[in-house]
Amino acid sequence: MTQTLPTERRRRRPWLLRRSLPLLLASLVLVVAFTSEATSPLQAGYPVAVEPEGIFKLDHLIFLVMENRSFDHYFGTYPGAAGIPMKNGKPISCVPDPDTGKCVYPYHDPSLVNDGGPHGQQHTAIDVNGGKMNGFLRTYRAAKPFCERFQSQSCTQVPAGPNGQPSVMGYHDRREIPNYWAYADHFVLQDHLFAAGDSWTLPAHLFIVSAWSAKCTNPYDPMSCRSNMRLKNGVEVQGEGKPVYAWTDITYLLHRAGVSWRYYVDPNTCLDACHRPARHDGTVLSQNPLPGFTTVHQNDQLGNIQPRASYFEAAAAGTLPSVAWIVPGMGYSEHPPDSIARGQEFVTSVVNAAMQGPDWESTAIFVTWDDWGGFYDHLAPPRVDQNGYGIRVPGLLISPYARSGLVDHQVLSFDAYLKLIEDRFLGGQRLDPATDGRPDSRPTVREDLDILGDLSLEFDFDQPPIPPLILPLDPYPSGGGG
């Protein structure tokens, strides 16, 4: 049973009011009834506990970012979602195949291993094709399949569709990703979540932590940075332990405000200033951009980038940070041709750990995928500036205060994550060059765009907390998730 959000949007508070809201809430006191013989705590001068309200009930925001799947590829047939256009249970929109001259329709793909398509900025433009959303096979045919490029397995292990269709036109449902669909059933599914940038993994992860992707001529001068969605060399330079991203990221504001944060990576990830050949394990640098930010070096915050074991320890001990990002390593990130079963197992382990720990009732977990990975999606992304939005990706909110069963149709992007962090922990301060105390040359204050929805509307803070939903790591009846 899906819900819908109220049609009336909240009026945006002025920045000063947003900034002062935590102070106003902190100043409220509860007047306790007392008998004629007793003295109230207020009269006696004792402090009175203040019950937090709204988003201030959330002490822990967790952002789990997987790789390379479009919304239609995972939730295109989810009930109530803006999914693949259908008539009588069959897709009615198709994509022309330049090799065969035929128009290829989306099809159900039962395989847990898929090939993907190219997904740089130039490929976004071709796939979107002015809003027609019909260039996916054109870009796919122009590139070698991922299984050949990564040489991690034979291309024969990546099945095509029943009529030989490339798997970029395939979609999954509850049969292949039962845990993801169970989270959508019990919590919130976001069906208008667009990648913040119109490009690949590195720009996406830069947007997730800073609302921008740029190239800087001077790593210590934020004004030397200019928008760049085709970053490549920065990955190698960052691998030498040098900062390359001079603009302001959200950890600068968190550190200044004394708000705890962590960025959890695969245990085989290089965490210090090192350079080594490419490996087939660990979290790759394009998914781990914070070591490349000048602010993280200057604030001595590199120690906040930790192996994922630290997350599981904190979840069990009730010591989760206020803000956490969690990213996978190679082989289970769901980046084609990774098995989606291994990725789902990882996500489930992260969610189960939070649910089983003492911090569950003050936690919100957001699960998303960094870009569309070349897979078909029918919904054209809005254009907000020269950098995006990108093609739609899946998004889930998992929290005891989530509006259970809601399919959120608000237009969202990764910028909405930063907006929620800022509203909850920073008094509404934005990554705004005019107000954040560290000016840079970003073209847009993304969190303040009128088109951007409000994640706080996905919560009902008056409802009894939803109990944990502990799911099996291998949910397949015959153990077929390997």
Image (tube, rainbow, N blue to C red):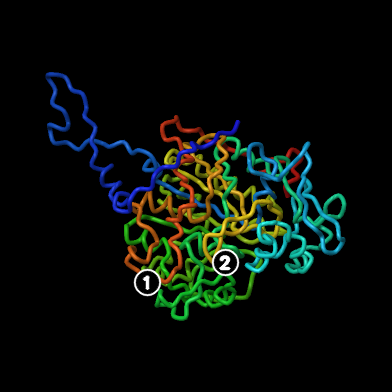
Q: Is residue 433 left or right of residue 167?
A: left
220 or 374: nearer the viewer:
374
Disc 1 crowd rating (10 Å Cα; few below 14, some 14-19, many 20+) is: few
Circle 2: residue type? Leu
Residue 81 x/y as whole percent? 63, 41
Q: Residue at x 82, y 60 (%)?
A: 97
Residue 110 visible in this rendered orientation of the protein: no
- Say above or below: 173 vs 254: above
Badge 2 or badge 1: first in the primary sequence: 2
Residue 119 x/y as whole percent? 67, 64
Circle 1: residue type? Gln
- Say above or below: 66 vs 187: below
Q: Is residue 305 left or right of residue 107?
A: left
Residue 195 x/y as whole percent? 57, 57
Please identify, in this view, whether the residue under mark 2 or under mark 1 is nearer the observer. 2
Look at the image and tell me in which quarter the N terminus lies.
top right
Residue matched to label 2? 202
- Say above or below: 180 vs 303: above
Residue matched to label 1? 298
Q: Quadrant of residue 404?
A: top right
Q: Residue at x 36, y 68 (%)?
A: 299
Q: Secondary structure at mark 1?
A: helix
- As measured in the structure, the alpha-carbon distance from the residue carrying label 2 to the one carrying label 1 is 22 Å
Q: Is residue 90 left or right of residue 405?
A: right
464 or 75: nearer the viewer:
75
Q: Residue at x 76, y 39 (%)?
A: 87
Q: Residue at x 73, y 48 (%)?
A: 171
